Amino acid sequence: MNNVVLSSVVLLFMAPQISLAATETQMTQDNGAPVGDNQNSQTAGPTGPTLLQDGHLLQKLQRFDRERIPERVVHARGTGVYGVFKAEKDISDLTLAKVFSAGTTTPVFVRFSTVIHPKGSPEELRDPHGFAMKFYTSTGNWDLVGLSEPVFFIRDAMKFPDMIHSLKPSPISNVQDPNRYYDFFSHQPESTHMLTRIFSYQGIPSSYRKMDGFGVHAFKFVNSKGEVTYVKFHFKSRQGVAGFSGAQAKMQQAKDFNNLTNDLYNTIKGGKYPIWDLYIKTLKPAQLNDFRYNPLDDTKEWLGVPETKIGTLTLNKVPDNFFETTEQVAFDPSNLIPGIEASEDRMLQGRLFSYADTHMYRLGANYQSIPVNRPKVKVRNYNQDGSGHQTLTSGDVNYQPSTTSIALKDNPAYKKTTPELEGTVQQQIIAKTDNFEQAGIFYRSLTPQQQNDLIEDLGNDLMQVKNEQVRHTMLSYFYRADADYGRKLTEHTKDDVGLIQKMAENLTD
Ligand code: HEM
């Protein structure tokens, strides 16, 4: 009798613990029903076929079959982490953006990436590097989808798909081919600056912590009076900027081809948080004509324009799950907030369309409700339904205008600025191209060792170009940027320096 009582007491005492643990670890199907056997399929007897009625088996295979979403069409290989941006300087005379209100801290998600190479590719392959930032601000998400270089190859969105096709592997061999991309770039002299940077140490960073980040395009700051100031963003790494030569990259790749991800994850997990200082350069609209280039051309830096430090970015948390965050994060240059508008930069204008479009294809119409993309403020509008829809926000009134008191209202205080326009509709290249000067300035800013590495790596790449006309045209661009640069490259490729010099002299700017 006593034994029975005792064992009941023991059972009663232990029961909650056992049942709690069992509930927590009980496997379920996607509908929540408990799974009885996750090792053996239902079969017709010991020797018969597997049964169609085994819903758990079917669901397990179906879900596995659908684990991959489309890879990003560019920037597929990337690494994302969380962090915080702190605004430090009062710039309310320039912008009403809350994210820049002095003292404000804003959570961010940042994704670094290469551009051309696929999702599992080695991280030492030469490429521009993405530096994409999502600021979860108190007036909605602001995405600054930038690069580790201050400029881009081309200046019109119309050319982007062709440029990427030429850089991606050949549709016949599935191998990247310099013959194809130099064929394209030989028609784009404005790419001389970016190509010079990409074939320098900047094209293969030794660490994501040791890259600067640039917004590349000009944006518009708008203050509370509706006044516009053009602005460029530059995040300067406190860790310095460092990269590999082609030869060093090969050695690194043999040791660890995930080195950029491992380095970033390990330093953040070890509590050594990388920091960037945000600097801005600004121009008033009336100043846009003061330069020999067009300041709204993304192949140009604003050289000589003074810069001001306005805040710091600190990366401090590695995500718990790669797919949920880094794969599903969806940056979009058209995610702008009050106080920041797009400039008339022709590349940026094309990007304002392209990103939401690709996200709807890659992640579905409701991609902005995926947790990593979801704003920290409440979203209220009448966009509805579609695949991936999660919450009903509108009740019975899902239209506007409406006489009801619950209908959502817009607010004219948030209307966009109304810049003046002139001229006719046209399809013309911009007036001031200035294709070569800044490439030369960049070349001359390199140390002798960095110049030698550039000549070696770019020269080796150009030597693979079989079409003489294409190779000579490319060499003439580099020669036009800087005679020493062009001569050394031409000697490296064993072409005729006199010929290249003449071609360079005949180029228009
Ligand atoms: C990613 C299009 C120019 C920076 C992407 C993606 C597309 C795209 C479709 C993939 C997005 C995804 O699937 O998540 C374009 C078009 C351009 C253009 C049409 C020109 C018209 C640029 C420029 C920059 C840039 C000039 C830099 C200033 C990036 C970055 C990513 C990206 C950083 C990766 C974002 C991430 O980490 O998820 N772009 N792009 N792109 N683009 Fe562009």
Image: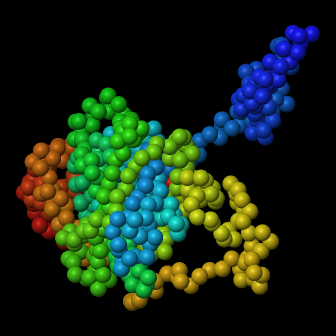
Q: Choose top left, top right, bottom left or bottom right for residue 439.
A: bottom left
Residue that extends furthest to the right in the rendered view of this protein = 1
Q: Which residue is drawn at 12% across and 50% down?
A: 447
Residue 264 image point, x, y percent: 38, 41
Residue 53 image point, x, y percent: 85, 31
Q: Which residue is drawn at 62% across and 80% down?
A: 410
Residue 363 image point, x, y percent: 60, 53
For the residue pair 81 and 387, the one nearer the viewer reads as: 81
Residue 506 in the figure: left or right of residue 317: left
Residue that extends furthest to the front in the rendered view of this protein = 2
Q: Which residue is drawn at 24% across and 54% down?
A: 197
Residue 11 vs 211, above or below: the answer is: above
For the image shown, how many numbered marks are present on the structure? 0
Q: Which residue is drawn at 38% across and 77% down?
A: 92
Q: In which quarter of the image is ligand 1?
A: bottom left
> Is residue 57 visible to us here?
no
Residue 444 in the figure: left or right of residue 465: left
Q: Choose top left, top right, bottom left or bottom right for residue 484.
A: bottom left
Name the quadrant of the C terminus.
bottom left
